[in-house]
Image (cartoon, rainbow, N blue to C red):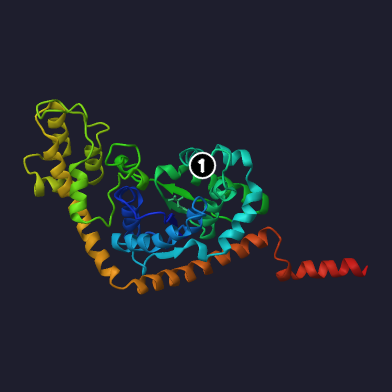
Amino acid sequence: MAKIILTGDRPTGKLHVGHYVGSLKRRVELQNSGEYDQIFIMIADAQALTDNADTPEKVRQNIIEVALDYLSAGLDPAKSTLFIQSQIPELCELSFYYMNLVTVSRLQRNPTVKAEIQMRNFETSIPVGFFTYPISQAADITAFQATTVPVGEDQMPMIEQAREIVHKFNSVYGETLTMPDILLPDNKACLRLPGTDGKAKMSKSLGNCIYLSDTAEDVRKKIMSMFTDPNHLRVEDPGQVEGNPVFIYLDAFCKDEHFQKFLPEYPDLDALKAHYTRGGLGDVKVKKFLNNVLQDELAPIRERRKEFEKDIPAVYQMLEEGSRKAKAVAAQTLAQVKRAMKINYFEDQALIEEQAKRFQS
Ligand code: TRP
């Protein structure tokens, strides 16, 4: 069976380092591994509109930001198809049919939907489109017959829901859709990177993000003012590494060679952590190290971004081309779905003849 990846992001803001370690970096590795037959990366503008219906301009502006983040992180249109969700109307058609296979109470129990409803203070004014976006996400995944969906752990309930829809569809209408598997980041620290303020999640509205497109100076400032262990007041004090965002970022980004390059007095991260825990290691020193590590990772991304920014029309053209390719694939799946659901009347010669006979006898 072909190995096919589908994944994507909502274009509600520029991508940050949480997106990068949580999924983007992995996607680039998967792309370059040569192990996948097809890779589809989607800018989920239609999904973004489910809770941004009154701010379409925000979504529109961020499409190019996300596309630039993709390209500069190393996604290569020659290897991966990058496309825009709203340009594939087949996804809406699939969603409409899948809606019949999901109950309201099942959607209400979806933990991601629950958490997001709470976060957005929707209470009783939940837009129907938002409420049903797990169904549209199942359409995104199945339209490409994806076998593998690399996403962060917050998306686990979405993939679970998609799997249920696939199971239900195939058992009602016959084997048609491919069962997708989630692919989580393998480094635990990457599952969810906290904000620079120590809050559980990086979020634009909290102002605690480090963006892929930040300048070197912005990144340095953000790191130097990062939240650490609040009880680690003096250098001599023993410090805590668990839950300390500076160390979580190091867990996510730092490799042993970074020590040889920037902090040769320690062999590895375990030694640095042990010293911090023991006491006698100041936050500033650790932050300076983290800054070096992050700059090392982000500098090539920033350089590539500058190049792509020089020809924005070419980026749109690439997205248009990708959307055209994606649409052709989704159309094939939709045709299979309609055949399975027996709503392919005009291509079903047997049906036409059978009906003709019925009316003649
Ligand atoms: N829900 C994802 C996010 O918020 C975006 C997304 C839409 C997606 N459709 C998808 C991810 C299908 C994986 C597969 O980032």
Q: Quadrant of the C terminus?
A: bottom right
Specify whether 87 is left or right of 79: right
At 17% from the left and 44% from the top, the residue drawn is 290
Please say whether residue 1 is visible from this viewpoint. Answer: no
The spot of residue 352 in percent (x, y) is 79, 69
Q: Nearer the viewer, residue 242 or 197?
A: 197
At 56% from the left and 37% from the top, the residue drawn is 109
Please say whether residue 178 is visible from this viewpoint. Answer: yes
Q: Nearer the viewer, residue 206 or 244?
A: 206
At 17% from the left and 28% from the top, the residue drawn is 232
Q: Quadrant of residue 123?
A: top right
Instruction: Count residues near mark 1 (Cα–Cα under 10 Å), then give few for <14, some for 14-19, many for 20+.
Output: some
At 54% from the left and 48% from the top, the residue drawn is 130
Query: Badge 1 is on which residue?
Result: 113
Specify whether 100 is left or right of 75: right
What is the residue that sits farthest to the front in this orientation?
Answer: 54
The correct choice, above or below, for 182 with respect to 8 in the image is: above
What is the residue that sits farthest to the right in this orientation?
Answer: 361
Q: Quadrant of residue 337?
A: bottom right
Give the SS element for disc 1: helix
The correct choice, above or below, for 353 with respect to 129 in the image is: below
